[in-house]
Amino acid sequence: MRRLIVRYEKDIASVNMVDRFIQGGQWSEAGTDREGRRYITDGDDTVVYLQHQHIRSEHLDRDAKEAGFAFDVIVFPSVHSAQSGIPALTVHPIGNYHEAEHGGEEGKLVPACPAVMTDMLRAIKAECNIPEYSICFEVTHHGPYLETPTMFLEIGSDESCWGRSDAADIQSRVLAKVREKNDYVNVIGIGGGHYAPRFTELALSSKVNFGHMLPNYQMEGRSDEDVAASIRKATEASRTECVFIHRKSMKGSQATHLREMAESLGCEVMRSEDFEPLTGN
């Protein structure tokens, strides 16, 4: 699997993760793109050095490909910001179901990489031996807009956490570890909150990969037509027709309505018992 890894120089977590990742490798200077961004390569991995805000680096993949670089997946190591300040190691897909308040394009999701992203979550769990860290998915949010499967790999949640060397060590090992795609079933997640605890729990215990996630707050006050459009965006950008609904995060009538809506779109609605347990769980 060929990867483009983005190092954003104004993001201390990004810098620490990527710099640790490239230590000891056989990296070579590989030129620049039309915007003057520097690239280095080592085997199937390419690192791009970004000077402008990563969540607003629209069409970075197009520029990289025009410059001759080939990749299947893009990974953005990054800080994660939250008022809680809780130490956290997270992964998430990107895009905007509606307004584009933090980069990207309005109403557009970026292709997800369910197998890679979910295996990185599992690798974080395996590599992290520090109990204070929360390990979880975040649901789909923010930019940039790209046309290549993309994910963010993050350290949170405030300035006291972003520069921690132990967190950067863990995430750099995760980057080095996950290099192939598994063949588990891919689903989108519907329901729950921003940190997707049910989806995280399932991913860490079952043979299932999560792509885009549509939380309750993205459906509140929206018409059925709008919600159906969001489900369709999520399945198309995750390249799956399978859906998992976090039924306990909503009223039973809403869960039933969402199931019927998803089925009317041609989706297969799956339950937790449909997923094989991971070996050793």
Image: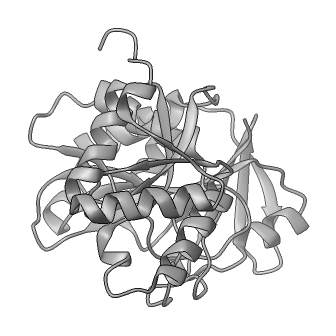
Q: Residue at x 36, y 55 (%)?
A: 154
Can residue 124 be seen? no
The colour scheme of the drawn protein is: one colour
Q: Residue at x 48, y 69 (%)?
A: 9
Query: Which quadrant does the N terminus fall into?
Result: top right
Can residue 104 be seen? yes
Which residue is most to the top? 280
Residue sitting nearer the eye, 67 or 61 = 61
The quadrant where residue 49 appears: bottom right
Residue 112 at x, y percent in the picture:
60, 55
- In this rendering, position of residue 44 left or right of residue 122: right
Q: Residue at x 63, y 61 (%)?
A: 265
- In this rendering, position of residue 273 left or right of residue 2: left
Residue sitting nearer the eye, 233 or 33 = 233
The quadrant where residue 221 appears: bottom left
Residue 37 at x, y percent in the picture:
71, 72
Residue sitting nearer the eye, 6 or 165 = 6
Q: How many marks?
A: 0
Residue 100, relative to residue 116: is it above or below? below
Query: Which quadrant does the C terminus fall into?
Result: top left
Residue sitting nearer the eye, 269 or 181 = 269
The quadrant where residue 238 appears: bottom right
Residue 111 at x, y percent in the picture:
65, 60
Residue 38, relative to residue 74: is it above or below? below
Q: Residue at x 38, y 31 (%)?
A: 122
Residue 269 at x, y percent in the picture:
50, 45
